[in-house]
Amino acid sequence: MKMIGKILVATVFAGLTFGAPAMAEDASANSSDPGGLANAYGTTFSGVGSKGACCGDYDYKNADGNANAVISNFNQKLSAMQLAIIEALRLSSGQASGVAREQTGAQYNLADQQDDRSTVKSVEEARLRAIMEAESSPSACAVITASRGGSSQGAAALVSAAFSKELAGWSRGESEISKKGKDFSLATRVAAHCKYATSSDVDSGLCQSLGSSTLSDDEASKSLLKRDAGGMKYTYAQDTLEAARMFVLNTASPIPVQQLSTAEAKTPEGLIKKAQQSTYMGRASVSVSMLNDFWSDRAPIITDDKTLGYMNGLAKEMQGYGGVSFDKGASKVDWLAMQSRMFVGSPSRAAAADKNLAAAVKEIKNILAVIAYQNFENYLQMEKMNVNLALNNSILNDSNRASFEGR
């Protein structure tokens, strides 16, 4: 899979780069059968009313053709029905001549009329199925097209995994910067901070000039939690992507551990130090993983023109999305947000859903599909919450133990 350079940008640290893979039959009926149409009920009328597009209209001419094919022998059936009535009257009048033969003929003709009922039912079933297949809900095409965005879940997971791997290398002192020691690593981080320098940084002489007033590497509302276009867009712009990335580094994995020297690795003290480092690394990795997932879900991982064109078109007709554009990429969160909001944010879709029962039912089906996906996402978040709670409990328990043992 090819790499997405626009998603995983180079950090301000030389050598600290993050790479991640991108997901990113014509209608038919039975021929005339003088012996009856008992099999007409099971006829499959496929493709009725379809024009080859997900938003076609009901094709009455095609449906009429199906009906004509099924009822072309109705004149024969009418004659058979008259004969059945005559035969039944003759039998009921007590005529003895040829009773057995006439009884057999009457039973045959009456049974044939039952086939007529099946025929009529089959015609109605074909007509209703044609309407059902041709009638489009206002978001039918949109949901079908937007299913391409479902791959964003896998894309976000890969980006997050790559980011987590790189931060783990930083924390273990294995990156080109952190392997040079704690002091050098911290100095490099401070130098990188000047891109987002505040007035206090300039007054102290730490940085020469102010950084961007809309970005920050230590203020979540200006980086990790920043939203553009009036708060309606979740996808990070390129500069926000970098600031949010620095925020994760500064908060979740700020100080890399020092590698053990050859001499330390052979001493009891060195083993204790390594055990403590492993505990720190394990606990920090939970926070890093969750922050990385949050960051990756907002990275512009959707880059194909078809999906972006669909999202831009949908944004133009939704309330509150007047200034939103996804020309430079869209995130998993924005894809899900638009799928959720289009049922209430698009006046044209709401009006179209009320035009008839078929459209309303299809719209309900699409809404339930989105809700089902949202419930799954909620389940994943609950799993993360449980892991975090378990980690907090383990830290509290360890602190209590240390206090009990006098450590």
Image: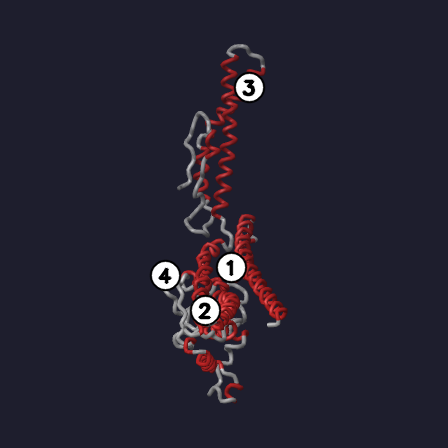
> Identity of the amino acid at label 3?
Ala
Q: Which mark is first along the chain, 4 or 1? A: 4
| Image quadrant where one finds the C terminus | bottom right
Which residue is at a point 50% across and 55% down the rendered structure image?
Answer: 139
Q: Name the residue under label 3.
A: 88
Front-most of 272 and 12? 272
Number of the front mark, 1 or 2: 2
Q: Which mark is first along the chain, 4 or 3? A: 4
Q: Mark 1 points at which residue?
A: 339
- Give the x, y percent position of residue 127: 49, 41
Query: Circle 1: is it few (<14), some (14-19), or many (20+) Cα within 10 Å?
Result: many
> Identity of the amino acid at label 1?
Gln
In the rendered structure, are the residues bearing label 1 and label 3 in contact, judged by CB atoms less than 8 Å apart? no
The type of colouring in the image is secondary structure
Front-most of 170 and 310? 170
Q: Distance between the residues labelled 1 and 3?
A: 63 Å
Q: Name the residue under label 2.
A: 168
Q: Mark 4 points at which residue?
A: 1
